[in-house]
Amino acid sequence: MIESQILLDPTAEVSPAKRQRVTPPDSLEGKTIALLDIGKRRGNVFLDRLEECMAERGLTVKRYAKPTNTKVAPLNVVQTIAMECDIVVEALSD
Amino acid sequence: MPTFQDGFIIVAKRECPTCELLESVYAELAAHDVVLSVFSQDDPSFPDSLNDVIDDTGLENSYSLDVETVPTLIRWKGGKEVERAIGWNKTEWRDLTGINGLGGDLPENQPGCGSITVEPGMPETLAVRFGDTNLEARRIEVAAMEDDIEVGFERGWSDGLPVVPPTEVRVVRMLTGTTRDPAEVLGNIPPNLASCTVEKVAINAVMAGCKPEYLPVVLAAVEAALEPDFCMHGLLCTTHFAAPMVIVNGPITKAIGMNSGGNALGQGNRANSTIGRALQLVIRNVGGGVPGGIDRATLGNPGKLTYCMAEDESDPIWDPFSVDRGIASGKSAVTLYAAEGMLGNMGDMSRTPESLTRSLAMSLRVIGHPKKIQAHDAMIVLSPEHLRVYREAGWSKARALEEFNKVLTFSGADFIEGAHGVAEGISPDRADEQVSKFKPDGLNIVRAGGIAGMMSAIIGSWAATGERGSKLVTKEIGT
């Protein structure tokens, strides 16, 4: 078994020890939203409905898909989303 | 902490020929009516003559007893050590045990071997293993499958290049490079004015790739940066190119293998590269000075990764720069300079000091901006072949600097706003003045470089110098 490793914090320790999540945006206004189908069954149903709701609010939506839910997204998918969008929503549902 | 029974303690290892030689002695001792505790560092079945050897392959007992050599014989009484014999000396062992005929046929004397506890890297490892480090920094747990190099990037600890993961063992090892208390506070690092201990500097020195013996230089550099005269906060926040440049003088440059020769301002020397980087990492990680945050440099310069050199003091013609700065000859020191990138001057036809001074002055004139006057300082990094011209003419450094200032004094008319069709410039009412490019003491010279090449480097300063910005700060390097 590979054991975890302990490192010493090189900072002034003013932020929490656990890595923080990226702060969600205050507003979706003017943002381009990626909807990522991870390849799991019926995820597309959820994303279709989400796209409809977002379109009604006048938001810009782009659709992307992973080839399979069993592996992490291919680099080109990740990079394309990063270049074209500000926010990404992943459909995790069955 | 392990506890020990009153009686005799022996620490040994099978790999040690002296320990093996003493098989009959162990058996003799066991046969007497004494309490005998024998610890084996490498093989619990050794010594073969005893049945109740204590397994110390984990080294906790050896570490606790501070054993440096095996075999070590200790007399323990009332919960503490009374007497110790190191290696084999027949008389010493007989006196210590009170057994007259002990080791009858053995040689009188046989030195022991090194304890496993003092093998390279082991003292730090054992200090961490047995909780003896007294390190205060917060522990960050990295999950088993996480790449510890990527952790440095993900947590924002990196300057853009991989950092060495600051494990407890590496930090303890780094701290062996200084005699200072890890808890000692050096000051508050800008911009967040966070308290910085020797331990925090050591952690960042590990990440930069320093060896422990570089740590006193890094500590002196951090202390220099904290001097109000250096104005580190302003230097960090500026839109200008400048960054703290570390110039190291004195015997430590040779002791730690710094490069003051070919490529003195380039790559390839571990000490040069990592000392400058460690200072930058302290500012980044402890102080919170991060590009895009408080660091608003328009372009920056490559020296913001690391900017560190040693002066070549091999030619006694001129005093070391640190001596000019008030440090006693023979002492080691760092000087911090708020430096922008370097400008090369390839003047390879000047064979007289007069010509060479004028030649270099042509480059010095454009520092900061060709029409700026007394706005920037400058540092000439003079190569050996250029130095030779001054040496052969018998010029002192003071004479050279005096001549530089003479030839860098101009008619104000060429520098006023609008002159030569350029808006930049000094006030038009100074047109009739004679103006000097540099403030008094604004121009300095250090020596470095390879033996071939009639070229020197000119390094301009931050746009805010002297009283309104950064001054040179020199600190003697301690231990």
Image (cartoon, coloured by chain):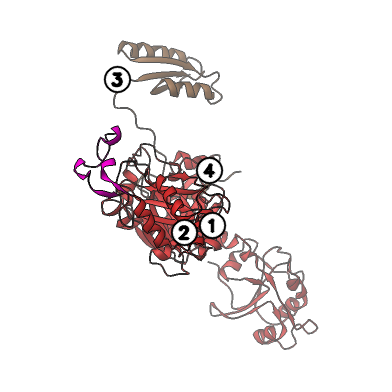
Chain colours: A brown, B red
Give the residue at mark 4. B148
Q: Which residue is mark 1?
A: B258
| Residue that protrudes farthest toward the right in the picture | B105
Host chain of mark 1 = B
Q: CA distance from mark 4 to mark 2?
A: 32 Å
Please state the extent of the stretch shown in magenta in the rendering. Answer: B409-435
Q: In terms of secondary structure, where does tag 2 sit?
A: strand
Disc 4 secondary structure class: helix
Indicate whether B16 appears above or below A79.
below
Q: Residue at 58% across / 71% down in the picture?
A: B66
Q: Residue furthest bottom?
A: B100
* Crowd tier of the residue under label 3, counting other residues whose Cα lies within 10 Å: few below 14, some 14–19, many 20 or above: few
Q: Is residue B211 magenta?
A: no
Decide which of B112, B325 is in the foreground and name it: B325
Labels 4 and 1 within one chain: yes
Q: Nearer the viewer, mark 3 or mark 1?
A: 1
In which chain is the residue bearing label 4? B
Mark 3 vs mark 2, foreground winner is 2
Q: Position of residue A10 (x, y in %)?
A: 43, 50
The answer to whether residue B323 is seen in the rendering is yes
Separation of marks 4 and 3 at Cα, in angstroms: 38 Å
Badge 2 is on which residue?
A: B248
Q: CA distance from mark 3 to mark 1?
A: 56 Å
Q: Nearer the viewer, mark 4 or mark 1?
A: 1
